[in-house]
Image: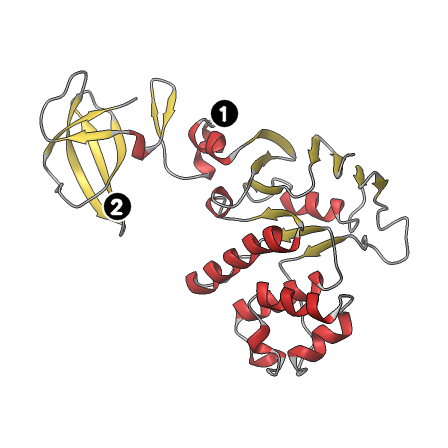
Amino acid sequence: MSFLDVSVGDVRMVLSKGWKLGIAGETGSGKTSLLKTIAGLMPGGSVFFEEQRVLGPLEKLIPGHPGIAYLSQQFELPQHLRIEQVLEYANELPEEEAQELFRVCQIDHLMKRKTHQLSGGERQRIALAKLLIAAPRLLLLDEPFSNLDMIHKEVLKSVIRDIGRKLDITCMLVSHDPLDTLSWADEILVLRSGKVVQQGPPIQVYQAPVDEYVAGLFGKYNLIDGKIVRPEQIAVFSTMQPRALKGRAETVSFWGSFCEVAVLTDSGLHLTVRVWGTGLAAGELVYVTVP
């Protein structure tokens, strides 16, 4: 039985139950439109959820599907209510299950607070819990990490990982920073102008992108003789190595767990190289090998 079968414009996809799908693409590539269509909030295409067609907004009075939850970028919470009140009104779960959900969402300590007393990250998690207590089977997350600082972003990432594992909810996630999806997704769908340009496991999309567009979405890369090479795939040495390219380190930038080195080879090739440690300095003679 197919859990989700989607045909929207040039996008054709099937999603299995329990799967985590990340959707990447430049601004305007169709990511949000795809999610809204799947949720039944936007007309167009054909969407079958658990082998039943999802009706669009032109076909039913109140748009949406009870088994599909969509968290938009512009979510809203009622003002000046306690969190326990906001969640009580929407709850369709037994008390024990609801309390477990609140623990998973890391909001169980916020129940007595009022909505206007929350940080952005806390509001995001409350809005997510408010959707989940309606017991959906499919969760669609549209840019859930936008406008969050690093601390709240990491908390929300942890919550989203736990949702699928502990609550048995299938997830689709869109992020303006596609790097957010690499460590989370079982599969990544890359869109450009409403078309699928690549789909596959995160390691394949990252290490073997089909073109420079896909490569650029997931970080820096080098183009060497028509081949896309990631900075960490290039090795740097201070002494001559077999088949190495001689060059000079032009700049060395410290990024915490690694350094990024801009290398200009004697043949005029500009390379970005990632090294672990701070042993190199700008101006040093180096030898680089590429796979």
Nearer to us in this view, 47 or 112 = 112
Marks 1/2: CA distance? 27 Å
Kindly indicate whether the residue at mark 2 contacts the one at mark 1 (C-beta within 8 angstroms): no
What mark, if any, has residue 210 been given in the picture? Answer: 1
Under mark 1, the amino acid is Val
Hey, which quadrant is residue 206 in on the image? top left
- Label 2 secondary element: loop
Under mark 2, the amino acid is Phe
Q: Quadrant where the N terminus lies?
A: top right
Residue 142 at least partly seen: no
Residue 231 lies, in percent from the top left, at: 31, 34
Relative vertical location of residue 272 with respect to residue 267 in this rendering, above or below = below
User: What residue appears at the point 59 percent right and 47 percent down from the top-left corner?
Assistant: 174
Residue 134 lies, in percent from the top left, at: 76, 62
What mark, if any, has residue 258 been given in the picture? Answer: 2
User: What residue appears at the point 63 percent right and 66 percent down from the top-left corner?
Assistant: 100
